[in-house]
Image: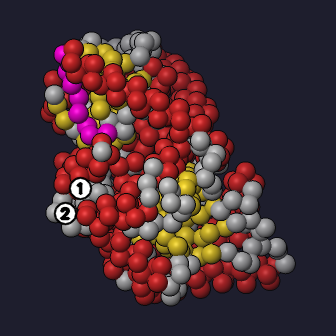
Amino acid sequence: MICGIGASAGIATGPVFLYKSYKPVQSAIAHIDVRAIHDSKAEWTRIEQALRQGRREIQALRQKASREVGESEAAIFEAHELFLDDPEFLQRVHDVLDVTQSSAEYAWQEGATQFAREMREIGDDYLAARADDIDDVARRVLRILSGAPDETTPITEPVILVADDLTPSDTITLNKAMILSFCLAEGSATSHVAILAKALGIPAIVSLGENIRQLQSGMQVIINGANGEIFIDPDEETRERYGQQRQALERQRVLAFQCAFQPAITRDGKRVEVVANIGAPEDAAEALNAGAEGIGLLRTEFLFLNHEQAPDEDEQTRVYRRIFAQMGQRPVVVRTLDIGGDKPAPYLTMPHELNPFLGIRGVRLTLAYPELFQTQLRALLRAAEGRNLKLMFPMIATPEEIRSAREQVALAQKNLKARGVSFAHHFEIGMMVEIPAAAVLADIFARDVDFFSIGTNDLVQYTLAADRTNAAIAPLADALHPAVLRLICLVIEAAHQRGRWVGVCGELAGDVLAVPVLLGLGLDEFSATPKLVPFIKQAIRNYRTDEARQIADHVLTLANAHEVRAYLQAQGQC
Ligand code: PEP
Ligand code: MG
């Protein structure tokens, strides 16, 4: 048995498929004799043909992404397409071809490598991310030039997909209907693939490290996405045990979806709100179909990232209106723009930061760019007229930030009034609790906000000083760590004393294991990826509040996340 980190719960059994996203760089280059003289004109024509084919492939991917995952993923391919037309980049390839008189493959790869390297050397995060896009595009065109098949087509039967890591292109291209589970050497419980696996409702294990080398194509394995275990060539007894567990989980799934539209009420009659996290307008329908009672987190970044310019007020208003219209009078918690640091935008000239997660992120950034902030606030207020908006600010560290953000809201209202435009006047204002300082001072913040939503993905990284993107320390970044749970407890107690409500919108809210703890701590609202909403509702129905309180009280006395998990698993089996 090998073990990684469980990133999406569930059990899968099947054959391993070792997926290597096409990396022909070394192999294709190695056998090219750079001294062989080629006809540069003919080789350039081959490159142009490959670019046309690449463009067609990327456009198809973009449409597929927009249909299956939403506009935010689709925008990544827009950036890829732009590179195929970038005159500076193409000139570089042309120059290499002229100077070396080599083959199209060599010139293409050499030009792309040089170009990406120079972008990385500038030390700007945005350009470094664009360099990753170049690598992705370069691999595609090189594959076309060398006549190799697209590696994603062979998956024609259900498999356990094993890879070092997956790029956004990989995850879109793969035939997801045939993927029973993802197992990755890299990644963390809050990484792109983990969130995607939960959205697709399939088990996933990340951060397997070198253990992954033990997995070979065709091997039969059992995956337990809840605790990160992989059984290689399992014996009869293990197969039998997991077969039964899988059937039990399937029965639970059917039951959860049958009751998805009923409220989540504990055995002693307490009703708890269960809502969904969404990242694009298309996700709203899925949230409703899963029985979500509203939106607990609308990540608005999809409108701003991978675009050459920030969207204007009218464009944003249209998109927000679409989402509000789908949700009717249900609550929609909209988080204002949360970019900066690791999520740079091309139209903001930001200084390079050594520690982007500790830099100009979230509300710090929007307060530093008031025009950007004002445009978004005006659009939101216009779109929310007659709707149930709950406005929320990310990455709040100090009460002064809340006050400044509130001033910005007042300014946006004043501006709309002066323009004679109608807009929402009554709505709640809340903050995300992602920084320990905000949790510790929750009693002070409670004077200035109507609600709190705890972002455990960031709260865990700041509490345990564990970068959420670093696979090497992924086991440390566990939101069930008692230090994180104690902070959640502090927030809920302080908020309730002032009559404020508290939600959790980090990945912890979608973890069935955490339900009794959060319930016992008195959480008012769980916000999870749509597919998990029925399971969370169902789990809430299993408990009495006094039982949950006892479980919560006990875990707060434990020393580490491992002890918390072991205790909760044992409770679940009682
Ligand atoms: C969080 O930090 O928990 C959160 C919900 O925000 P994001 O994952 O978008 O940073
Ligand atoms: Mg966050």
Q: Which residues are magenta?
A: 226-235
Q: Residue 134: in sight, yes or no?
A: no
Residue matched to label 1: 564
Horizontal side of 167 relative to 505 (left or right) equals left
Q: Residue sitting at 66 percent across and 83 percent down? A: 411
Contact? badges 2 and 1 (CB < 8 Å): yes
Q: Residue sitting at 25 percent across and 64 percent down? A: 554
Horizontal side of 488 relative to 52 (left or right) equals left
Residue type for callout 1 = Val
Residue matched to label 2: 558
Residue type for callout 2 = Leu
In terms of depth relative to the viewer, which is nearer, 431 or 550? 550
Q: Please, is residue 504 above or below residue 411 in the view?
A: above
Residue 231 tag number: none
Q: Please, is residue 227 above or below residue 276 in the view?
A: above
Which quadrant holds the C terminus?
A: top left
* Colour theme: secondary structure
Which secondary structure lies at badge 2? loop
